[in-house]
Image: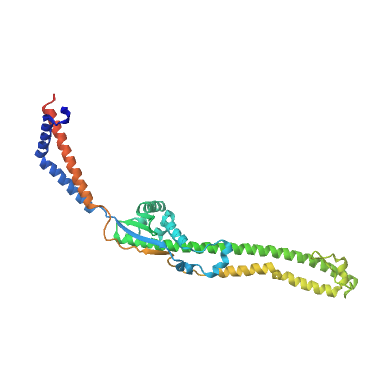
Amino acid sequence: MSDNFTTPDAETDLFELIETLWSEKILIAGITFVAGILSAVYAFIATPTFEAEIRLLPAEKTQLAQYNPVEYGALSDLGIPGLNPEGALKGTLDQIRSTARVTEFVKNRDTKTFNDQVELTEDELFEAVANLVSDAISISKDKNAPQTVINFQHSEAVESFRFLSDLITWAQLEVQEQRVLDIRNTIERKIEVNLLQIERLTQTYERRLNEDLAVLEEALSIAIDLGITSNQSGVFVAEGQGRLQEANTLYLKGSNLLSAEIVALKERISDSRFLRQVRLLEEQNQTLIDLKAIELPVGEIVKIDKPASVPRYAIGPNKKLIIVLAIVLGGMCAVLYVLIRNAIRSRQINPRS
């Protein structure tokens, strides 16, 4: 039952402890003061961190209308989607998240992002940008808010603002340039496919006409040998399945009529555009060439809900917190040091205890 009350010995020990600490108050205060001074020096000489912020929203459909000309309706069967607000925002964010793409941005940027950027090798620059993308750039979206927030941290306030502003502008241009390149490549592939189709149709067409020409020339040769100049057949010689019959009866048409047919057939051979399919493919290619020549405008494809600005205050280091923690930890260390030193002295005086 006596365990529930403070014993006289415990009270004596507590008073001795307080007395010991009070007797060393100058030492404890000195250590605490030094810790506070050192932390204050560190807090004021440490490299500050400034954070610039920009908030983005999907663009309005009317804003993107200029990037989707009505002429591109002819490309609907080629699988090229129009530029839509969600896709434009996603493409912009994907550029910012890509270390490889941001490396290209840093290399081509007028202002140097790193102090030693010129001295870095390709691999070192890539690694530096990878650290920048993972540590200095953050992309977040609140579930309860439509905006996408992009933050960038840097040791200089103006540079944090300039870098983030340049990055957003560059990312949008990259999305537009990539889209133009995709459209151009798709058009060029379709033109090549059409040209191959035209070549195949032309070769098939000319081969068939050359076969018919050979039959007519053979019949003409027979008609000349027999001295038949005018038509002796009485009726027009029929064709079989769209092809001329053998020359064994065609010679009766006479050399005059056969010669005229040969001239007409050679003219048809020299111009394969008599074929309707070839004409349609050539017209389609001309349409594709016209579409390829369209110059798309360049501009903003996302809506900037809150533009970036030069941060007025550094977000780190937290000077007040550093000083307070240093004072608290310094005081604790000072107290612990005094207690340990006092315990060692007590053992040296009373080794048996």
- Identified at 18% across, 41% down, the residue is 332
235 vs 328: above or below: below
Rendering quarter of residue 58: bottom left
Q: Point out residue 21 in the picture as x, y percentages from the top left corner.
A: 12, 38
Q: How is the image coloured?
A: rainbow
How many numbered callouts? 0
Q: Residue furthest top?
A: 352
Q: Is residue 271 left or right of residue 328?
A: right
**x then y, percent, for residue 172:** 43, 63
Nearer-the-camera pick, 204 or 222? 204
Determine whether, in the image, residue 22 is placed left or right of residue 176.
left
Query: Relative to the observer, which residue lies in front, 311 or 149?
Result: 149
Residue 310 location (% of width, % of height): 30, 62
Please state, as top left, top right, bottom left or bottom right, where the N terminus lies in the image.
Answer: top left
Residue at (15%, 27%) from the top-left corner? 2
Q: Nearer the viewer, residue 335 or 123?
A: 335
Q: Where on the picture, by quarter, is residue 76?
A: bottom right
In this picture, is 333 found above or below 202? above
The C terminus appears in which quarter of the rendering?
top left
User: Can you say whether 322 is above or below 225 in the image?
Assistant: above
Residue positioned 34% across, 55% down in the render: 116
Q: Nearer the viewer, residue 21 or 86?
A: 86
Drawn side of residue 127 relative to residue 324, left or right: right
Which residue does the image show at 36% across and 56% down from the upper left? Answer: 117
For residue 318, side relative to residue 26 (left or right): right
> How far across and how far down the image is residue 249, in percent?
88, 67
